[in-house]
Amino acid sequence: MIDPSTSLWLVVGVAAVVAGAILGARSSPGRSRIATAAALGGLSRRAIGIVALAVAVTGPGCSGSDAELGRRIAAEVAKGAGTVVQMADVTDFSWQQFHTFDPYSSRGLIESRIGFEWPQADRTGIQDSDGMTLLVFVGDGAVVRHVTQPRDQGDFTGLDYPAGFTPTEAVFTVMPRGDGAFLLVPVHKPSR
């Protein structure tokens, strides 16, 4: 699958091409209305096809969740009870704070914890689902990455630490949840 941010730029590019073609077709001197309509009709079918392809390739929701990072976390959790998961080791990017959000967390709660507005929080689906936790990595006053982590592939619920975790604090032990899935429990409580 293509990264959702890449598909967004693809859709924006297609929209720009379509808009340019429409403006060009309408402003062509000597072009009849029938010729202009025919040109636009063909272009519209092509543009719709390209946009449909972009949406199909990115998958539903287009929340921007880092699926590869989610798979790496799930692979660590799958090693079983007692496994220690260090978020700094499963990430391949720089971040300063790691926040976890339980199912049904509101955008207001998320923004109050991360310390700035993040409109994309509305598109994560966390507000409407009890099957996942939202993991947010913050650096330099922005969301660097986020993951909508299925709870059956690593359950981060119940970690009520408003200041989040630094890279050295974001170390978790995998514990059995009782239904075959696993909870992640902090090795040390954050110092703040």
Image: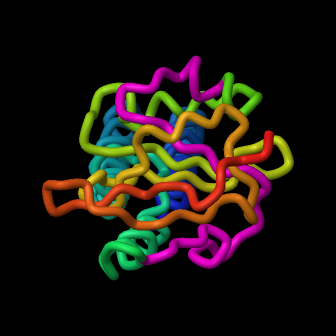
Membership of 99 in magenta stretch: yes
Residue lying farthest to the left in this orientation: 179
Q: Position of residue 67 (x, y in %)?
A: 42, 64
| In the image: residue 145, left or right of residue 147 | right
> What stretch of residues is rendered in magenta?
83-111
- Which residue corresponds to the image point at 73% horizontal and 63% vertical from the top-left? 167
Residue lying farthest to the top in this orientation: 108
**100 w.r.t. 102: above or below:** below
**Residue 122 appears in the figure:** yes
- Which residue corresponds to the image point at 55% horizontal and 39% vertical from the top-left? 19
- Which residue corresponds to the image point at 40% horizontal and 75% vertical from the top-left? 82
**Quarter placement of the C terminus:** top right
Q: Position of residue 33 (x, y in %)?
A: 38, 30
Q: Which one is in front, 164 or 189?
A: 189
- Which residue corresponds to the image point at 53% horizontal and 63% vertical from the top-left? 172
| In the image: residue 189, left or right of residue 42 | right
Q: Which one is in front, 7 or 171?
A: 171
Residue 86 quadrant: bottom right
| In the image: residue 113, left or right of residue 11 | right
**Residue 1 appears in the figure:** no
Circle count = 0
Q: Which one is in front, 4 or 141?
A: 141
Q: Which one is in front, 114 or 177?
A: 177
**Quarter placement of the N terminus:** bottom left
Q: Position of residue 59 (x, y in %)?
A: 30, 56
Membership of 144 in magenta stretch: no
Q: Position of residue 158 (x, y in %)?
A: 44, 38
Residue lying farthest to the right in this orientation: 140
The colour scheme applied to this rendered structure is: rainbow
| In the image: residue 110, left or right of residue 73 | right
